Image: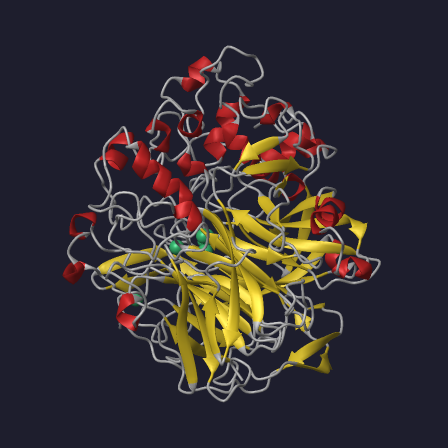
């Protein structure tokens, strides 16, 4: 659900590439937070070879393409019902919900706000998720289909001052926050690793598995890569800047070719606080520029007020004001924010191994981390997006070449050291002729080294301030890059661009942008009587690397599909001719099934939610260049014309794109993994009922969702984020 003034919909790229503009949109006042003002496919086979013209006629190299076989299920209709709907012939079961006990003999979840000890239970807001198979003897297995571990992100909690279901009466909406409430809220963030098992055709999680663990915002984590030990990282917790505590707002995921788990830290910046006089205390140094560029300003309220929980270090660390007298920050938490915003690597199989933040991959509002198809002797590419309005698309290219022997390494974290601590970080620029460039973010680049907007000290500074480095090189501002995924059939990369209220045909400023080729739509979508402007429905961009593959610095691109309601204007809005079995808004989660080649599209929408709950669709996409060029013509208020060339993929057909699932009320659909045979699919239903008002927290009749209790799962009627498992009644692969 997208709200106004939403900590999950940040907007701080006011850069006027290449000149940094330090004006910041401060979105929330401290009072606003405290007073509770929430403004509110069949089987993919390698088939024919296509030679196609892309864009202005540039020829794309011949590529084996996935040949679509019809998706073998009946499309699910849009729905506002408070249930999870799957196609006929499929079964959905709830597997693992907020509060479920997994450690330390924790009791059954009462779900009335009285439960505590969340460090022993499932966290909240289940998000990205990966599967790690286990053999019958409990060793890592690439083939097991009935026993494994799910590594699950717990992104956030329903939400600060509107519907706080984990507290008996909804939580304290004034400062200071009670320590006991803060402790619960902290503990429901982070990661779960939980064993799941199938016996007699029924999946369940294993409550007392020795593999189970939680990582929370208080867990000790190592800093790795260029920032390790840098002066930007010194804190009272780690005076030499080599460690930090915890991971936060974990959104998308990745699964490394060597079998570890990657999790992206997304909207972490809002959890921290700096005093209203801090800029002066710091002498208005460059840390102020960094703070603003990551969407924060001095005096702005933190998301939950955790810094007010008490004088103990675990609360004080959320206060990033300069409180100490040291010159390097080793006696306070003025540098604490520099420890968040990374891709974090975790060994899901071994809870004794310390997680590592892989700083070489940049610091921003990370979503997923999608690997190129590994090729022996070649570098790996890892694709990433920065989810905030007008932010960028990135990739990391490893220095080390892929060694297939690393597919089952003795030490997965050591393999991570090898591939993820050294490499090149790039940001994308998309041109109006359907081509583009990956521009390296290196301190060796004079444009970055001499950037007038921020004085980078070294490569660690470039990693910590990736957004500023990307501003310097003139990267393309995108419509909120969410997840990305790589098509295993041809290596092309798909990026969801979820929406952007900042696209405006008449834009003149640096945060409001005119439509451009890769973000070509600005239109009005009505939600009831309310007009939603910009690009409220989002689109899915795809990228084909140049001849050097994952290491290429050139690319071609087109738009796989534009989100739209099916009755919208097919000349301006519904450019992909979506039908009522296919129409969607605000694509977010995106995963290719390794077993079927189906691309699964998940939505986190607030635009089409007057008509339907969020959903998941199955797609058999084609390839970059399978459609054609289209010029969109806009008339500005001054009477002049804005013509925007774009490149649109071949329109999906009834057999290549279909709605597979519709979620419960006021939820987001996110996260997807499956058993290696493709016959059990796990997905997450995040924050059902999040539109409930906090004042209604003790009145179930006023909840906007009672899922999953209304599906027969668990005690109490408070809605809960949960992992579900989907199977096909005939035992077949999901989606076929
Ligand atoms: Fe957590 Fe941008 O999705
Ligand atoms: Ca509408
Ligand atoms: Ca998301
Ligand atoms: Ca969400």
Q: Quadrant of the C terminus?
A: bottom right
Q: Is residue 470 above or below residue 90?
A: above
Where ligand 4 lies, by image quadrant? bottom left
The residue lying at 31 percent from left, 61 percent from top is 688
Residue 409 appearing in the image: yes
Farthest residue to the bottom: give it.
730
The residue lying at 30 percent from left, 43 percent from top is 160
83 or 132: nearer the eye?
132
Q: How is the structure coloured here?
A: secondary structure
Number of marks present in the image shown = 0
Residue 348 location (% of width, % of height): 60, 54
Left or right: where does residue 147 sit relative to residue 488?
left
* Quadrant in which residue 12 is drawn: top left
* Quadrant in which residue 258 is drawn: bottom right
Residue 582 appearing in the image: no
Left or right: where does residue 700 sit relative to residue 127?
left
Farthest residue to the front: give it.
105
Residue 44 location (% of width, % of height): 63, 80
Residue 67 location (% of width, % of height): 64, 83
Left or right: where does residue 532 sit relative to residue 441?
left
489 or 184: nearer the eye?
184
* Quadrant in which residue 183 is drawn: top left
Q: Quadrant of the N terminus?
A: bottom left
Residue 355 location (% of width, % of height): 61, 43
207 or 223: nearer the eye?
207
Farthest residue to the top: give it.
325
């Amino acid at each position: 659900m997208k709200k106004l003034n939403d900590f999950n919909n940040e907007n701080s790229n006011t850069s006027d590439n290449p000149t940094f503009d330090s004006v910041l949109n401060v979105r929330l006042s401290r009072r606003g937070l405290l007073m509770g003002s929430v403004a509110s496919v069949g089987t993919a086979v390698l088939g024919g070879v296509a030679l196609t013209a892309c864009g202005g006629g540039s020829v794309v190299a011949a590529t084996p393409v996935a040949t679509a076989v019809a998706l073998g299920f009946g499309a699910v209709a849009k729905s506002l019902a408070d249930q999870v709907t799957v196609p006929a012939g499929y079964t959905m079961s709830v597997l693992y919900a907020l509060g479920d006990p997994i450690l330390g003999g924790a009791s059954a979840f009462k779900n009335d706000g009285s439960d505590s000890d969340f460090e022993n239970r499932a966290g909240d807001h289940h998000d990205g998720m990966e599967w790690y198979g286990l053999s019958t003897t409990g060793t890592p297995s690439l083939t097991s289909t009935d026993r494994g571990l799910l590594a699950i992100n717990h992104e956030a909690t329903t939400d600060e001052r509107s519907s706080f279901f984990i507290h008996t009466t909804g939580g304290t909406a004034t400062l200071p926050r009670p320590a006991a409430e803060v402790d619960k809220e902290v503990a429901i963030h982070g990661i779960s690793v939980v064993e799941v098992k199938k016996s007699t055709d029924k999946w369940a999680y294993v409550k007392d598995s020795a593999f189970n663990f939680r990582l929370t915002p208080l867990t000790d984590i190592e800093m790795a890569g260029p920032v390790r030990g840098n002066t930007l990282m010194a804190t009272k917790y780690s005076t030499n800047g080599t460690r930090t505590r915890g991971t936060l707002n974990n959104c998308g995921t990745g699964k490394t070719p060597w079998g570890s788990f990657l999790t992206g830290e997304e909207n972490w910046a809002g959890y921290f606080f700096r005093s209203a006089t801090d800029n002066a205390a710091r002498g208005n140094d460059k840390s102020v520029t960094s703070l603003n560029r990551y969407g924060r300003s001095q005096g702005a309220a933190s998301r939950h007020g955790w810094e007010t929980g008490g004088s103990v270090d675990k609360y004080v660390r959320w206060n990033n004001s300069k409180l100490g007298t040291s010159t390097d920050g080793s006696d306070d938490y003025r540098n604490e924010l520099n420890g968040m915003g990374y891709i974090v690597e975790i060994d899901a199989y071994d809870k004794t191994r310390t997680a590592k933040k892989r700083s070489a991959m940049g610091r921003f509002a990370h979503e997923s981390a999608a690997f190129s198809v590994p090729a022996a002797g070649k570098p790996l590419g890892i694709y990433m997006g920065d989810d905030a309005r007008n932010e960028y698309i990135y990739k990391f290219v490893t220095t080390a070449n892929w060694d297939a022997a690393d597919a089952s390494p003795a030490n997965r974290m050591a393999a991570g050291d090898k591939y993820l601590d050294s490499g090149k970080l790039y940001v994308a620029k998309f041109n109006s002729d359907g081509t583009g460039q990956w521009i390296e973010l290196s301190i060796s680049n004079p444009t970055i080294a001499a950037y007038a907007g921020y004085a980078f000290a070294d490569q660690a500074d470039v990693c910590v301030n990736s957004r500023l480095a990307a501003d310097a090189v003139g990267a393309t501002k995108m419509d909120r890059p969410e997840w990305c995924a790589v098509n295993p059939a041809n290596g092309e990369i798909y990026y969801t661009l979820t929406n952007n209220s900042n696209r405006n045909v008449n834009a003149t400023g640096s945060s409001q942008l005119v439509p451009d080729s890769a973000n070509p739509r600005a239109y009005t979508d009505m939600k009831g009587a309310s007009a939603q402007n910009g690009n409220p429905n989002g689109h899915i961009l795809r990228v084909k690397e140049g001849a050097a593959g994952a290491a290429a610095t050139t690319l071609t691109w087109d738009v796989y599909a534009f989100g739209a309601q099916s009755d919208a204007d097919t000349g301006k809005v519904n450019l992909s001719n979506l039908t009522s079995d296919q129409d969607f808004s605000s694509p977010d989660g995106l995963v290719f099934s390794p077993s079927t080649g189906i691309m699964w599209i998940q939505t986190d929408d607030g635009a089409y939610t007057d008509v339907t709950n969020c959903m998941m669709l199955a797609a058999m996409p084609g390839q970059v260049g399978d459609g054609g060029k289209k010029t969109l013509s806009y008339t500005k208020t001054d009477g002049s014309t804005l013509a925007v060339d774009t490149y649109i993929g071949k329109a999906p057909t009834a057999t290549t794109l279909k709605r597979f699932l519709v979620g419960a009320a006021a939820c987001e659909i996110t996260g997807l993994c499956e058993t290696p045979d493709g016959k059990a699919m796990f997905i997450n239903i995040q924050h059902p009922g999040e539109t409930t008002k906090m004042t209604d927290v003790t009145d179930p009749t006023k909840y906007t969702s009672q899922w999953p209790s209304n599906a027969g799962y668990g005690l109490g009627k408070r809605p809960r984020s949960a992992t579900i498992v989907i199977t096909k009644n005939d035992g077949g692969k999901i989606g076929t």
